[in-house]
Image (cartoon, rainbow, N blue to C red):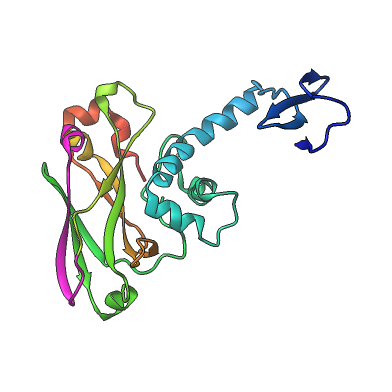
């Protein structure tokens, strides 16, 4: 983009060839007209786009969680932005149409995760934390610790066999003070309660994030991954892909 501080050719308006002129706040700007972008519809191009759709959907949901976006953006992974870093690291672990238990929502520089067990009920998801001195030392100086996650599940009511649904989760307040075990609960909201039957066959990705006094994320744990499998013969027969996560 260029500007004319002192006009010698008069006002620059309209389009001449591929150059556009405009006046804005008593200044004149010229810039190149956007070039037409042709999207290939070749078989190879279409196949390539289809391959990237599921991982892009996963990356978009992870990137929409502020704490995770900040940590990915500031990670050492080489990519254009947080979204593309998530895509780059997760793509190798995807099935053709959905993520697996090998996918993750935290950068590779994450620290040890104290979560040892996950349980699901109609009220929500409970996670058991085993806190020791090493875990406590990782959260020293943090003003608060929060828990965020993504749950990946099938939704038969939509009648789709070849795709997956994703929801964001956030834990209730976490207070980490002493060594020992404690439970953290992520209560279901109205949408979560509606999806409970689908959550019974799902993959949970969950991480703890420490926050400093300014509210900026400092560290996150390697995300805890849990596959919830609820065997119902009739459903299993109708939706055979339910058992093919790994």
On screen, 88 above or below 32?
A: below
Q: Residue at x 46, y 65 (%)?
A: 109
Corner quadrant of residue 184? bottom left
Q: Depth check: 193 or 227 in front?
A: 193
Q: Residue at x 23, y 77 (%)?
A: 132
Corner quadrant of residue 151? top left
Q: Is residue 187 magenta?
A: yes
Q: Residue 228 at what x, y percent from top left?
A: 23, 46
On screen, 16 above or below 184?
A: above
From the viewer's perspective, is 223 left or right of 116? right
Q: Which residues are magenta?
A: 175-194
Q: Residue at x 27, y 65 (%)?
A: 144
Residue 207 visible in the displayed image: yes
Q: Depth check: 208 or 202 in front?
A: 208
Q: Residue at x 27, y 46 (%)?
A: 169
Residue 33 visible in the displayed image: no
């Amino acid at each position: 983009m260029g500007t004319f501080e002192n006009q010698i050719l008069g006002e620059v308006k309209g389009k001449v060839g591929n150059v556009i002129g405009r006046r804005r706040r008593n200044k004149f700007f010229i810039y190149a007209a956007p070039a037409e972008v042709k999207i290939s519809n070749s078989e190879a191009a279409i196949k390539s786009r289809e391959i990237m759709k599921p991982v892009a959907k996963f990356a978009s949901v992870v990137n929409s969680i502020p704490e995770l976006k900040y940590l990915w953006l500031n990670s050492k992974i080489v990519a254009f932005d947080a979204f593309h870093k998530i895509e780059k690291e997760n793509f190798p672990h995807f099935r053709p149409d959905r993520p697996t238990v090998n996918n993750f929502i935290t950068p590779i520089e994450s620290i040890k995760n104290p979560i040892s067990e996950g349980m699901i009920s109609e009220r929500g998801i409970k996670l058991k934390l085993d806190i020791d001195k090493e875990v406590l030392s990782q959260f020293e100086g943090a003003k608060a610790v929060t828990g965020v996650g993504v749950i990946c599940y099938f939704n038969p009511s939509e009648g789709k066999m070849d795709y997956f649904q994703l929801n964001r989760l956030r834990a209730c307040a976490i207070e980490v003070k002493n060594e020992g075990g404690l439970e953290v609960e992520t209560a279901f909201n109205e949408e979560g309660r509606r999806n409970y039957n689908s959550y019974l066959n799902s993959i949970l990705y969950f991480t703890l994030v420490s926050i400093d006094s300014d509210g900026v994320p400092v560290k996150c744990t390697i995300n805890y991954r849990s596959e919830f499998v609820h065997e119902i013969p009739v459903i299993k027969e109708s939706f055979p892909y339910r058992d093919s996560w790994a």
